[in-house]
Image (cartoon, rainbow, N blue to C red):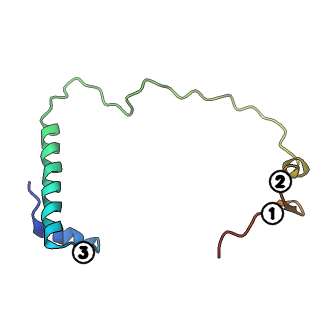
């Protein structure tokens, strides 16, 4: 399989991108290099190799879910720089 500049132009149109002719040539070349590399990977014998989801043997160590008393509003707001009624007051960030 080979990617042509016509393919690049079609994909660019779908993605609403504009490329110059030189950029289309470069993109086609780079995509062909990627496909060539994938073809090499497809040729590797992986018989007997177990699939991996990660390269580490780590296992998630989760703490026990222990119930505890939540903070009261007063305790939660004690260190807040500003509050109003029983809420944190923060600067407006949306115009």
Q: At 85% across and 61% down in the image, what residue appears? A: 83
Q: Which residue is mark 3?
A: 18
Residue 62, horizontal then vertical, whole percent = 61, 29
- Labels 3 and 2: the sequence-earlier one: 3
The crowd level at tag 1 (other Cα within 10 Å; few <14, some 14-19, many 20+) is few
Residue shown at 39% from the left, 32% from the top? 54
Which residue has dot 2 on it?
A: 80
The quadrant where residue 29 appears: bottom left
Of residues 78 and 47, which is closer to you in this image?
78
Question: Is residue 44 positioned above or below 91 on the image?
Answer: above
Task: Name the side, left or right, on which 61 lies relative to 87.
Answer: left
User: Which label number is shown at residue 89?
Assistant: 1
**Does dot 1 land on a helix, a strand or a loop?**
loop
The answer for how far apart the CA atoms under marks 3 and 2 are is 50 Å
Q: Residue 34 — which label?
A: none
Q: Are marks 1 and 2 in contact (CB under 8 Å)?
A: yes
The picture places residue 3, in percent across and down from the top left corner, at 11, 60
What's the distance in space between the residues labelled 1 and 3, CA to CA?
46 Å
Mark 2: few/some/many CA within 10 Å (<14, 14-19, 20+): few
Q: Quadrant of residue 23?
A: bottom left
């Amino acid at each position: 399989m080979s990617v042509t500049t016509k393919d690049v132009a079609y994909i660019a149109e779908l993605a609403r991108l504009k490329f110059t002719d030189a950029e289309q040539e470069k993109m086609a070349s780079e995509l062909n290099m990627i496909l060539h590399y994938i073809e090499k990977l497809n040729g590797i014998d992986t018989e007997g190799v177990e699939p991996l989801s990660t390269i580490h043997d780590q296992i998630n160590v989760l703490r026990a879910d222990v119930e505890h008393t939540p903070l009261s509003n007063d305790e939660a707001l004690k260190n807040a720089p500003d509050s109003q009624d029983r809420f944190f007051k923060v600067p407006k960030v949306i115009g």
